[in-house]
Image (cartoon, rainbow, N blue to C red):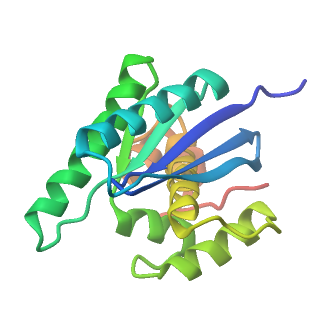
Amino acid sequence: MQKSSKLILGIDPGTLLMGYGIIEVQGNDVKMKLMQALRLSSKKDNYDRLQLIHEKVVELIHKFKPHEFAIEAPFFGKNVQSMLKLGRAQGVAIAAAISAGVPVTEYSPKKVKQSVTGNGNADKEQVWKMLRQLLSLTEEPQSYDATDALAVAVCHHFQSNSILDKANNKLRSWDDFIKHNPARVSAGKVNRLKS
C-alpha cells in the first residue's frame, strides 16, 4: 500500500526578497516541488509590499495545498526598524497560512542550519550544498533566500519526524521513551533501533 504524501511550505520572510520552498514527503522519500523567491521593489510602499507577500502566500497555499507551513523567525539584530519590518513580513505570511487553516511552525535561523547541516553557524552556501545532497538537486538556486526557505521546510520535516516523535505517541523525553519501551532497555542501555 502506498503512503499518502505530505507537502510542507517553507518561508524565509523578507521585505525585499521572500524565499519560498515546497517539499513533498512520501514515506522516507523527500522531494523538492518548488524553490523560488518573490522580489519586491524597494520603491514600493511598505504596505504594498506586505500585501504582495500576503497574496503570494495565499496563492501558494491555494495552488499547492500544503499540509504544514514552516517559517523562519526573525533574528534579533541591532537595527530595530529592520526587525519591525521583517516581523511584519513574517506576520502577514503567517496570517495567510492561519486563515487557510494550515498549521504554522516557526524555527530560528540557528535551528534551521543545525537541523539541515549539523552546524547552527553554517553559512548559506553550506546549507545549500547539504540541501543539494539531501534532495538530489542539480539546479542552481535563484537566490539564497529561496534555498533558506527550502531549508526551513526540510528542517520542519526533520523536526516533526525525530525518533522521539515516531516512538509511541510523540514522547516528550528519553525517560518517556524508556517507560513506554521497557523491552528495548537492558542493563541501563537502550537497544538500537533495527531497520
Image quarter hosting the N terminus = top right
The residue lying toward the viewer, choosing from 64 and 50, is 50
- At a point 79% along the width and 54% down the height, the residue shown is 195
Task: Answer yes or no: is residue 147 visible.
Answer: yes
Where residue 76 sits: x, y (%)?
Answer: 17, 66
174, above or below 137, in the image: above
Left or right position of 95 against 195: left
Question: Toward which corner of the image does residue 191 lie, by quadrant?
Answer: bottom right
Q: Residue furthest right?
A: 1
Where residue 187 sits: x, y (%)?
Answer: 51, 65
**Label tally:** 0
Question: Toward which corner of the image does residue 100 lie, by quadrant?
Answer: top left
100, above or below 138, in the image: above
The residue lying toward the viewer, choosing from 192 and 49, is 49
Left or right position of 180 against 29: left
Where residue 77 sits: x, y (%)?
Answer: 17, 71
Where residue 175 sits: x, y (%)?
Answer: 37, 50
Q: Residue furthest front?
A: 43
Task: Answer yes or no: is residue 187 visible.
Answer: no
- At a point 37% along the width and 23% down the height, the residue shown is 98
The residue lying toward the viewer, choosing from 73 and 140, is 140
- At a point 57% along the width and 32% down the height, the residue shown is 60
177, above or below 77, in the image: above
Left or right position of 95 against 186: left
